[in-house]
Image: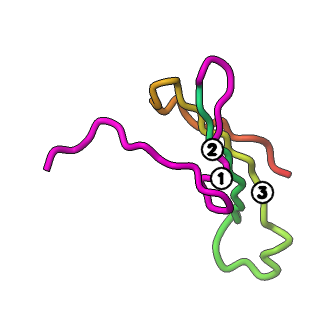
């Protein structure tokens, strides 16, 4: 089987792909929010959790341009 150059991804409501969209000149994006901890197993870990917004951008052909990390909330 040949590996395809491009794999289309359908936007599905209430799933990870729900956060896929388009902006200027047909460019595409996928946004998500993630949490991190400085190290595993911390007592009172909820106090140390940091939240980040990440924006993945793609050109009009679907080529990944990279994530754009936000600042912790």
Distance between mark 2 and mark 3 Cα atoms:
20 Å
Circles 1, 3 touching at the beta carbon (< 8 Å): no
**Residue named by callout 3:** 51
Residue 35 in picture, x, y percent from top left: 71, 61
Q: Is residue 63 above or below residue 41?
A: above
Distance between mark 1 and mark 3 Cα atoms:
20 Å
Circle 3 Cα neighbour tier, 10 Å, few/some/many (<14 / 14–19 / ≥20): some
Q: Is residue 40 above or below residue 2?
A: below
Circles 2, 1 touching at the beta carbon (< 8 Å): yes
Residue 69 in picture, x, y percent from top left: 69, 40
Question: Which structural element holds mark 2?
Answer: strand
Q: Main secondary structure of the magenta part?
A: loop
In the image, what residue occupies the spot 81% across and 49% down?
Answer: 72
Distance between mark 2 and mark 1 Cα atoms:
6 Å
In the picture, measured across the screen, residue 41 lies left or right of residue 60, that is: right
Residue 26 in picture, x, y percent from top left: 59, 23
Question: Which structural element holds mark 1?
Answer: helix
Circle 1 Cα neighbour tier, 10 Å, few/some/many (<14 / 14–19 / ≥20): some
Residue 59 in picture, x, y percent from top left: 52, 25
Q: Is residue 35 magenta?
A: no
**Residue named by callout 1:** 18
Front position among marks 2 and 3: 2
Decide which of tag 1 and tag 3 comes sooner along the chain. 1
Q: Is residue 20 magenta?
A: yes
Front position among marks 1 and 3: 1
Front position in the image: 64 or 17: 17
- Magenta stretch in the rendered image: 1-26
Count of numbered tags: 3
In the image, what residue occupies the spot 51% across and 49% down?
Answer: 10
**Residue named by callout 2:** 20
Question: Which structural element holds mark 3?
Answer: strand
Dot label at residue 47:
none
């Amino acid at each position: 089987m040949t590996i395809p150059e491009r794999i289309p991804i359908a936007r599905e409501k209430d799933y990870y792909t729900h956060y896929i969209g388009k902006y200027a000149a047909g460019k595409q994006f996928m946004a998500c929010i993630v949490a991190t901890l400085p190290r595993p197993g911390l007592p009172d870990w909820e106090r140390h959790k940091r939240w980040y917004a990440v924006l993945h951008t793609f050109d009009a052909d679907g080529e990944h341009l990279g994530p754009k990390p936000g600042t912790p909330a």
